[in-house]
Amino acid sequence: MIENIANTLSGMQVFDIFQSMTLGLMEPRSHLGEAMMNATVAADDYRPTKRDYSLIGRDARRAVEIGLSAAEWYHTDVPRKQMKELMKRDDGPAIRDTMIWLGVLIQSGAGGALLWGSWWCVPFFLVYGVLYGSSTDSRWHECGHGTAFKTQWMNDVVYQIACFMIMRNPVTWRWSHTRHHTDTVIVGRDPEIAVMRPPDLVRLVLNFFGILDAWQAMIDMVRNASGRLSAAERTFIPEMEQYKAIRVARIWLVIYLATIALAVYLGSLLPLMLIGLPRLYGAWHHVMTGLLQHGGLADNVTDHRLNSRTVLMNPVSRFIYWNMNYHVEHHMFPMVPYHALPKLHELIKHDLPAPTPSILAGYREMIPAFLRQLRNEDYFIKRELPPTAQPYREEFHAEGKTTAE
Amino acid sequence: MTEWIQACDAEDVEQEDVIRFDHAGRTFAIYRSPDDDYFATDGLCTHEKVHLADGLVMDEIIECPKHNGRFNYKTGAARGAPVCVDLKTYPVKVEAGKIFLQLG
């Protein structure tokens, strides 16, 4: 099968396909999970529905053939001078936020540990869980882009810490997110599509508790720690980087084994409540916010205004999420640090659909769309543009027009 | 045989910034460092062919606007994922306020 693909594609495209395949076979959970979990199905066992989400399947090939992959995406015109100001890096905001994050994390964890055995520990672990199992999603994301801090080693340190907590191999996941930005919600190409069509609602609900994600992450970690990379992994992770993926997995495995051993020795779940389990009981916030990024919107379009959603949120969620609620803006200009996204939003909002006014409004829009997609997977929510905006490229919406709102 | 091509005025490039220069079907990026030195590289990122002139210059680094891949624009060296292939660099000279590139 791979040879057949190779016969029809250029060398670089084949590399990309191999890269996708590796992501598909390896572990994949997106930061929301579903896409990459589905992609773990081995290529030969894959049974495509109308949309073929396999990263080496029919739609992947089609996307490459028709130029949907690695396409030129729409960008709002922003004068260079203003864009330079917005892109400017600054250590201050991220140092402040990281001190708050780690400070509250340590205090809530200590509070939970001290009150362990009484119900009073519950609110402490609710806070600790979200800071451990959700805020690390955005720290992984921002530091992976290298935009959170001006100083690169600070990005690297927080990236490594966040990767451990969110259970994402730092080598593997750097590459997965690169593809997500190249081919955002392009079927067969994007390994981080959170909700495929028709939606698997059971999987979606389970992911609120991180159950599938964490289990798959453990399997991958043990495999990597044993020194084994799959054949696909070896084609995708550059040879000079492979030892890093193995080394990280071994360090992580030692930490988890030590935590389990301590829990057994103490005859208490407490060590696991502090390391590991928060990835489950604290995952809900990052899934809640993450689903809003693209859920229910168009696929196979090259305009982030159509396939991404900006949602106005409360300040606490924005702190946890590091402003990724400005998601159209982030995808359009990934060079802009999280702390400058509100300014970017103000600058280009004339060219964007009106932001969704709240998380609740987002779910009121999204859940009915998911339910309709169970009956008609071609259905999607079409975002309306203000009169001041540049128009969409309608040629990409010929199929969707009949079913979009 | 090498050829010096006039690209633009030196003042067209702001300090610690980059501009795009197209010539004979090719595209280049011309940089002005914080120390007011000028450099030139191929204009497209070696990762996914994105114009580097839309990126961010920080000291001696150019960051690609698409995936945040980094290069040292003075040497062309790739500085981390997702870029793995170095950029080609070109000699630059400034004469009478004009920037010239030597294209091999």
Image (cartoon, rainbow, N blue to C red):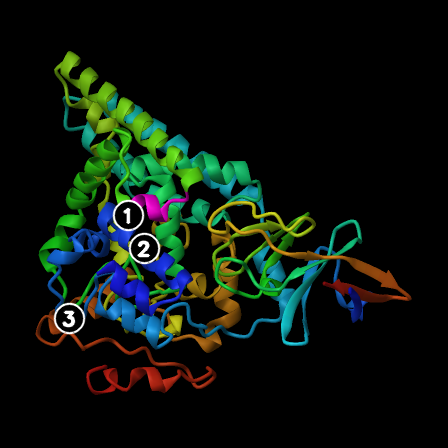
User: Residue A31 — which label?
Assistant: none
Mark 1–mark 2 Cα distance, whole angstroms, equals 7 Å
Q: Position of residue A4 (x, y in %)?
A: 25, 65
| Pointer 2 residue | A18
Residue A352 left/right relative to A246: right
Magenta stretch mostly in which secondary structure? helix
Q: Quadrant of the C terminus of chain A?
A: bottom left
Earlier residue among tags 1 and 2: 2
Q: Closest to the observer: A349 or A225?
A: A225
Instruction: Give the extent of the magenta segment.
Output: A233-238
Which dot, 2 or 3, sits closer to the camera?
2
Q: Residue furthest right?
A: B96
Badge 1, how many Cα within 10 Å: few under 14, some, many 20+?
some
Earlier residue among tags 2 and 3: 2
Q: Quadrant of the N terminus of chain A?
A: bottom left
| Pointer 3 residue | A368
Q: Secondary structure at mark 3?
A: helix
Disc 2 to disc 3: CB gap under 8 Å: no
Q: Are marks 2 and 3 on the same chain?
A: yes
